[in-house]
Image: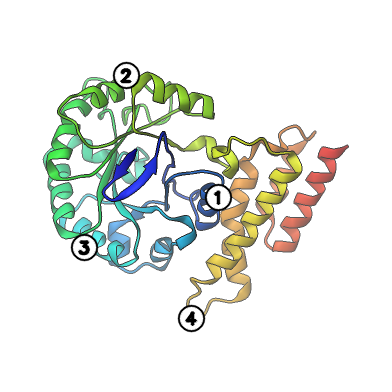
Amino acid sequence: MMKIGNIEFGERPLFLAPMEDVTDIGFRMLCKRFGAAMVYTEFVSAEALIRDVNSTVRKLTISDEERPVGIQIYGRDVDAMVEAAKIVEQAGPDLIDLNFGCPVKKVAGKGAGAGMLQNIPKLLEITEKVVRAVRLPVTVKTRLGWNHEQLIIPILAEQLQDCGIQALTIHGRTRSQMYTGQADWTLIGEVKRNPRIHIPIIGNGDITSLDEADAAFDRYGVDAVMVGRATFGCPWFFSREPLTLDEKIDILEQQLNINIERIGLTRKPGDTDFSVEKRAILHTRRHLAATPVFKCIPNFRQTRIAMLRAETKEELLAILEDCRSMLKQ
């Protein structure tokens, strides 16, 4: 039985990775419905959270229907990360995750995310002080190292455990790899086999099917597998029950409706029904454009462009129904 703190996940749990512009509340709720044992919000900038930036604060909105749910924060300043963790704790997630793995330039290039792998003393200071500042379980997500000359994860895992984290997720790439090449799980397995490691180790990288997740459990002995890009437009990824194309389109329509309803709950003074709906559509149409459901439609490119331009619920639903009809031809 895998546990993080007092949270029990059962055997071989699958986690939904925190992803910017992807893991909005509607998507998370559907992934949970289809079998994700743990979901995470989009990652949250500590600096923006402290400044009370609306778009960032909205990311803290969670639902009891998606529990257990984690909120992930990133930043490079110790005090800001501690303050952000305290704010996040008030939002009531089940755990707080520290992002030391995001490789994109606007994050890592500024010393946050995977950029922290170039400043291990500060990374450890942030971790230790956040653990002391909150009562919730604190976990970390990181990479193998900054580059292949600095594959520091075996040592770093022990150091992070000493800081008091209660689980560690390892993406099987370095920062310099970004998302290219193949994820290397051998070091993930090495960390898991280290007799000094007693916290759960969660493996991440290049899992594109449930069969591949099963193989990762068998081969590397990890406590959980985290799935990222393979879930784009596929909240049913975690289900072992086959679904028809009709059922999948129904689910995508549900996602749109959930987002409109849930994003409406974060309405601020001055927000209109149109602005709430438009925000929900912005979230949902990214998934619609990425889903493999429509790839067999001839000349889908034009339909995809129409999806990305749709600004109302009616317009988007009409496009989905057209797709449904084309798939039946």
Q: Earlier in the sequence, mark 1 or mark 2?
A: 1
Residue position for label 2? 186
Q: Amino acid at mark 1?
A: Arg
In three-dimensional space, the C-alpha distance between marks 3 and 4, rounded to whole angstroms, equals 26 Å
Comparing marks 1 and 2, which lies closer to the viewer? Answer: 1
Find residue 277 and report its image quarter: bottom right
Horizontal arrangement in the rendering, residue 96 relative to residue 64 (left or right):
left
Q: Is residue 251 above or below residue 277?
A: above
Nearer to me, 118 or 17? 17
Horizontal arrangement in the rendering, residue 165 relative to residue 106 (left or right):
left
Q: Earlier in the sequence, mark 2 or mark 3?
A: 3
Q: Earlier in the sequence, mark 3 or mark 4?
A: 3
Q: Residue at x 20, y 34 (%)?
A: 198
Q: Say which element carries label 4.
A: loop
Residue position for label 3? 83
Comparing marks 3 and 1, which lies closer to the viewer? Answer: 1
Horizontal arrangement in the rendering, residue 227 relative to residue 111 (left or right):
right
Residue position for label 1? 33
Residue position for label 4? 269
Comparing marks 4 and 2, which lies closer to the viewer? Answer: 2
Nearer to me, 65 or 133? 65
